[in-house]
Image (cartoon, rainbow, N blue to C red):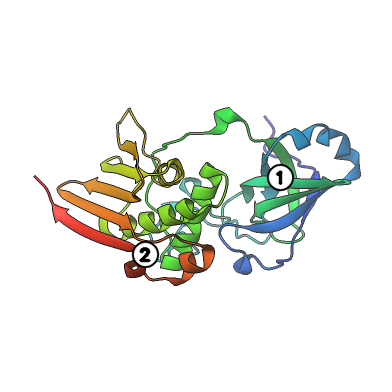
Amino acid sequence: MENSITLNPIGIVESSITNRDDMPTNGIQAGIRVFSPYVGALERIEEYSHLWILTWFHQAPRDVTTAVPSKVNPLSHRFGVFALRSPSRPNPVALTLVKLDRIQEYTLYVADMDAIDGTLVIDIKPYFEHDTVFSPRTPQISPLSANALQKTLLKQALTHHGETCPDLLLAVRMALIADKLLGYIKSPDVQVQVYGSTCLADAIQGICRARLANPARFEFCSSFIKHSIWIKGNRRLSISGVRELDLKAFWGLPDYEIFEVAMEEIE
């Protein structure tokens, strides 16, 4: 058996960011230029909305086996690198899910790319429906700052719901309150009830990953009010929206100007 392998890069990342420390955790808009010998492999790739990009993180350390996800939360527990998406690992192969915006000549223009300029691309694979695991079991590795968590939940809601709308913005702010007061809202012991529009319900479900069954964690009732109830153990958190949100209000207003919030103990 051979003890080594040879990889030939098929393209290169063209990004406005050149230092990995400057890269946001959610990535940015970028280009992936495919080298001429491999352009035939792009045939019909425009039929996909999302792609998996495998890259070689050449600036990452390769002599570590454990790490703290410090870019997300420096106070987090230490994990083995095979249990993280840390760039630092024996073989710094990165896996990134991107949204394909357009193709121009032999360059793919994508969103959410977290590789810096000049990163070599190993492979490109399409995102299929069977890649989806709606409610996986994962440890809690939440961003330390409220602003970073808000950006992360907004991205999750947009990925699930597909568009920005006032009730999606309301859903993200509701989820932020629930996360702050109850802890990890993707936990299987958190029950969620939503009263309001289908947009509100869809966005909240996309964030908390609560299913209607197996286990039953999610309930929805169409209503003119905008209200969510979050139950964990003997605590019930009620959040009622009192105004519409646009992006300026979403980022700028404090909770008390958007919601009426009540926490109570239940039997």
Q: Position of residue 26 (x, y in %)?
A: 57, 57
Give the residue displayed 64% in from the left and 35% down from the top: 127
Answer few, some or many: residues within 10 Å of disc 1's Cα (few below 14, many 20 plus, some between 14 and 19): many
Q: Which residue is mark 1?
A: 100
Q: What percent of the width, then of the height, locates residue 46?
A: 77, 37
Q: Residue furthest front?
A: 224
Helix, strand or loop under label 2: loop
Residue drawn at (66%, 46%), measured in percent from left and top?
Answer: 99
x 31%, y 60%: residue: 180
Between the residue at mark 1 and the residue at mark 2, the CA separation in whole angstroms equals 34 Å
**In the image, residue 143 lies at what x, y percent?**
43, 61
Horizontal arrangement in the rendering, residue 186 relative to residue 164 (left or right): left
User: Three-letter amino acid code at disc 2?
Assistant: Ile
Q: At x 45% / y 35%, what residue is drawn?
A: 134
> Does residue 145 appear in this view?
no
Q: Which mark is residue 258?
A: 2
Place residue 58 in its image quadrant.
bottom right
Above or below 236: residue 216:
above
Amino acid type at circle 1 is Leu
